Image (cartoon, grey):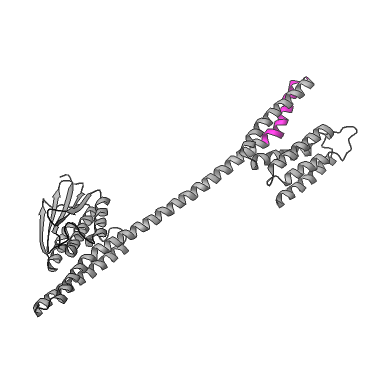
Amino acid sequence: MRRDILGAVGAFAVGVVLLVGGAYYHRSGVPAWFPGVPLAITCAGVAVRRSAPLMSLALGVVALSLDVAYSGPSLPTALVFTDNLYAAALYGPARLSRWLLGITTAAAVIIGAVIGVIDRNWWALAVFGVQAALVLVVPVTTAMVLRQQRDQAVAERARAEQVAHLAELDRSAAIVAERTRMARELHDMIANHFSAIAIQSTAVLSRKDLDAAAVQQIMASIRENSVQGMAEMRTMIGLLRQEGEDGDATRPRLADAGGLVERARQAGMEMVMTIEGTPYDVPVSVDLAGYRIVQEALTNAMKHGDDRAELTITYAPGQVSVVVDNPLNGAGTQLPGAGAGLVGMRERATLVGGAFEAGPYEEKGWRVRATLPTGNEQ
């Protein structure tokens, strides 16, 4: 607002200089100071050009009409009126700028035609029509171009902010997904060892008839599970700190499922492991998913099942399947407390495009089955 007021004062000062220099049409009977009145009115419109563009246009129209009808026309008032038109088209409603373009174009043509008819000179039509267009049409078209660029810049800024917001949401979702994956990895990694430790320690505490050799054997197995659990945890932390795939050599593989079976046997389970088909290299994601599914299924079998389980790994063209069967320890056909584990196994199979099912099998039995695609059709 302050800048507009200073601009209005400057425009009035320059206009007064032009009027003193005779830049207006001299009419007899009109005082020499009168052209300054419409000039002051148009300059008042300049002072409110941003805060009230419609009022600025109205003041300009009144001033130009007064100038043409009584004292002029004068050059300073016409020049300042172009700013009134420009401000109304730029800062006023968008519909107003379109209306002004049509009205000023029609007015320029009419002014040129009227003067040409009065003077009976078609050259006068062209000359005065162009002059009227410079005063009326050019300010409006200039404002419309700037307005379009300004609106486009606002739209681009809003689009950039939206893209940044979506990127932030994607980053947050990626962080949540990574934390979930890490939590699942830690659960799958240590649950098997800790379940075996809990079962063996419970057996030592609950049975009083064990001799020293049996206790020593169980305690050795507990120590082995503890050491292996800590080793796997350190391995995983090391992998998380590495970049790229440098740690592939130490990642769990489906071919290492025999180690899981051996630990289950040491925990007191009767395990039967069967490999069907010819083993072959499978994708890294499928290899890890299959290993973790076997690990979680055997952990659930130790915690909630009977003392025996059967693991079958089948290598077929294009897919590998994992099946774990175990009877339930007096739980009917339900597997209590395995909700989170089942969800994790299902998510792992789904992420690699496989299928997963878990549920009752035969009488008082439970089956976990996962079929994972490998892309190997040979």
Magenta region: which residues? Answer: 120-138
Is residue 24 toward the left or the right of residue 245 in the image?
right
Residue 18 visible? The answer is yes
Q: Residue at x 25, y 48 (%)?
A: 353
Dominant SS type (magenta):
helix
Q: Is residue 143 magenta?
A: no
**Viewer-nearest residue: 275 or 367:** 367
The residue sitting at the bottom extreme is 212
Residue 368 visible? The answer is no
Compared to residue 338, the image places residue 17 above or below, namely above
The residue sitting at the right extreme is 29
Q: Is residue 133 magenta?
A: yes
| Image x and y of residue 98, in percent | 63, 34
| Image x and y of residue 168, in percent | 43, 54
Which quadrant of the rendered structure holds the C terminus? top left
Q: Residue at x 65, y 33 (%)?
A: 99
| Image x and y of residue 130, in percent | 71, 29
Is residue 148 toward the left or the right of residue 194 in the image?
right
Q: How many callouts does the rendering have? A: 0
Compared to residue 41, the image places residue 345 above or below, namely below
Question: Which image quarter: residue 177?
Answer: bottom left
**Viewer-nearest residue: 92 or 23:** 92
| Image x and y of residue 332, in percent | 16, 58
The residue sitting at the top extreme is 120
